[in-house]
Image (cartoon, helix red, strand yellow):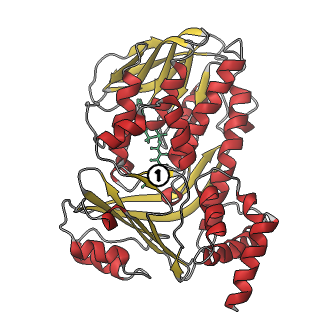
Amino acid sequence: MEKNLGKSALVIGGSLAGLLAARVLSNHFENVTIIERDPVHNLPESRKGQPQTRHLHGLLVEGLKIITGYFPDLLEGLQTDGIPIMDMAQTMQWYCYGGYRANFEFGMKGVITSRPFLEWQIRKRVLDLPNVTLKDGYSVQKLIASENNKQITGVQLIKTGQETAPETLLADLIVDASGRGSRTPKWLEELGYKKPPESIVTCGVGYATRLFERKETQPENLKWIFITPQAPRQRRAGGVFPVEGNRWMVGLAGWHGDHAPTDEEGFNAFAKSLPAPDVYNIITHNKPLSDIISYKFPASLRHHYEKMDHFPDRYLVLGDAACSFNPFYGQGMTSAAMQALALETLLQTNNTLDGLAKPYFKKVAKIVDIPWQTAVGEDFRFPETKGKKAPGTNLINAYIDRVHKATHHDTVVGAAFLKVMNMLEPPTSLLSPRILWRVAKHSLQKN
Ligand SMILES: Cc1cc2nc3c(=O)[nH]c(=O)nc-3n(C[C@H](O)[C@H](O)[C@H](O)COP(=O)(O)OP(=O)(O)OC[C@H]3O[C@@H](n4cnc5c(N)ncnc54)[C@H](O)[C@@H]3O)c2cc1C
């Protein structure tokens, strides 16, 4: 333990953000309890409270860096379990804007697993920590506050799905990592606080996913495939990941209601309608192993806790509970990891738990700004998208079109793009003179 800021900490939600929060808190508190609504078993599983985990999930390089910083043996563990860990640009087969991005050696590894498998590997390591406990099968119902409501002192919880008497758990610090459905805005209102301002930008995205058999021994069966749309003309996408258990996970997505059906004929026809054949080829050459399941994501949603004048002490919000973006850009887990790291920095530098909320939410807002802008900026390519559009979005999108096209031939632009996509560099790095010049050169050659 680095520093003892308090005796006990509580985390609401035992999914990825909650596990990372617990890992950070374990450095600063004598004991940490994760309260998870679902029963949790020691195996890779999608739980009722996180249905999105049955769909394609990619962990960006920045997220992987932070997470392996906390769990140095994670990659080894994943590899031992047969997870391919590969140079992400060499194994990429990504069709966009009329061509395939050129392959090259990026020097950065990508980890491709199913989301439940990744969470299980992380959860095992978190629960191995001597001061972390999981209280699963319990739902937090409300917050408990000091007499003047200025400080959160605990939570009230019940056994999920049972009409038992509520229990109370007290703690020195509580972190809400209960995901997109977080009830913090409502709980705060019950205590007399204002609701946080929120931003909503619609995208009307729908996912449909199916698992297929994969013959592991062939090297071409370790590639990952993306077909992404030239919006707004196209609004359909497809992805294929080689996941554990010698399986392909195939995901089809569409914007603003153009969703892949969940019957085989409709699913296959949607895949065939994509602008390149790669996903359809996988579907038609491999044996299906599962039903087709779907998930709807209506809008990106951000709670601006940083804009609240009054917020109680000893209470923080992390992960999708603070902000959930259109998942297509794969930023949720990395954003949660960055927020957990920001919490670590604050706990290391603060001598007290009081007054944490302001600097914490300021940091979260800064972290979330970039992925938020990336996701909603892309979604504003569609005229149906509703919400607050930042000035200059159309201009930036027009430039990004050219960046995409340049990546078909130019691996310098390709590397710059992948760094931004993986949240290793800010989007402004694509405007450096070197990249601007190369993008302009490719645009002129095309015309
Ligand atoms: C279709 C889809 C695809 C995605 N793809 C990607 C991707 O490729 N890459 C990426 O990085 N991210 C992706 N995401 C986002 C990613 O799933 C989340 O950012 C990530 O799982 C972190 O979520 P979380 O832990 O904050 O919340 P969640 O995963 O939603 O977990 C919240 C947890 O809190 C529990 N809970 C809720 N309420 C209570 C309560 N009252 N008491 C106790 N427990 C409670 C729930 O049971 C659940 O376990 C995707 C999302 C979707 C919808």
In this picture, residue 334 sits left or right of residue 164: right
Residue sitting at x 52%, y 47%: 332
Name of the residue lying farthest toward the bottom:
447
Residue sitting at x 49%, y 70%: 255
Residue 173's spot in the image, x, y percent?
A: 57, 17
* Residue 172 in which image quadrant: top right
Q: Is residue 192 visible?
A: no
> Which residue is denoted by mark 1 in the rendering?
110
Q: Quadrant of the C terminus?
A: bottom right
In the depicted structure, whether residue 43 falls above or below residue 10:
below
Q: Nearer the viewer, residue 176 or 147?
A: 176
* Residue 361 in which image quadrant: top right
Q: Secondary structure at mark 1?
A: strand
Which quadrant does ligand 1 occupy?
A: top left
Q: Quadrant of the N terminus?
A: top right
Q: Amino acid at mark 1?
A: Gly
